[in-house]
Amino acid sequence: MPKTAVGLFENAGLVDEVVHEIEALGIPRSEVRTTKEPLSFDGTGVMSFPRLDFEVDLLRELTRIGATKPEAQAYLEGLRRGGTLIVATGLDDKVDAAADIMQQHGAVEIEEGTGPEPHLPHASREGIAPQRDQSVMTGRIRQAAGGFFVW
């Protein structure tokens, strides 16, 4: 079963650099995804609630890969505030190294867990123009089934 690291970045300008460093570890670009809250939510019909659909899909995928509901909700809140998620899936040692890179670049929250690869709504594999700024890292470590979470 693959292992996944998820990091939340308040500064989207750091995301491109972090993604390139994760790719340099040998994690294929197809296994490194970024997602942020869409600027607009296009409806697909009369009964469509696109923003709600996005949020429900994101919460479902994060809990599917091992995040608790409160942790998934924290990621969603980070996206609402303009943050960007980086999700890297692969072998244990490479994902551990990817989580270290995320932490070194000031990810606000980092989670590692085992489970199926997430299919995040509006995830992008495209680079983001770099900007330089520092985010604040908070510290919390706890053991979880099959992985650990660094918060």
Image (spheres, rainbow, N blue to C red):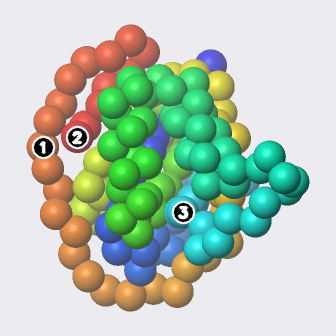
- Amino acid at the residue labelled 3: Glu
Mark 1 lies on a secondary structure that is loop
- Amino acid at the residue labelled 1: Gly
Q: Earlier in the sequence, mark 3 or mark 1?
A: 3
- In this view, the residue farthest toward the top is 145
Q: Quadrant of residue 149?
A: top left
Residue density around tag 2, few if under 14, some if 14–19, many if 20 or more, within 10 Å: some
Q: Which mark is residue 126?
A: none
Quadrant of the frame with the N terminus: top right
Residue density around tag 3, few if under 14, some if 14–19, many if 20 or more, within 10 Å: many
User: Residue at coordinates 31% horizontally, 86% vertically from top-left?
Assistant: 132
Distance CA(mark 2)–CA(mark 1): 5 Å
Q: What percent of the width, then of the height, locates residue 83?
A: 40, 65
Q: Earlier in the sequence, mark 2 or mark 1?
A: 1
Number of numbered discs overlaid on the protein picture: 3
**Which residue is at the front of the view, 134 or 40?**
40
Read off the residue under disc 1: 139
**Which residue is at the front of the view, 111 or 37?**
37
Is there CB contact under 8 Å for labels 2 and 1? yes
Read off the residue under disc 2: 151
Q: Which mark is residue 37?
A: 3
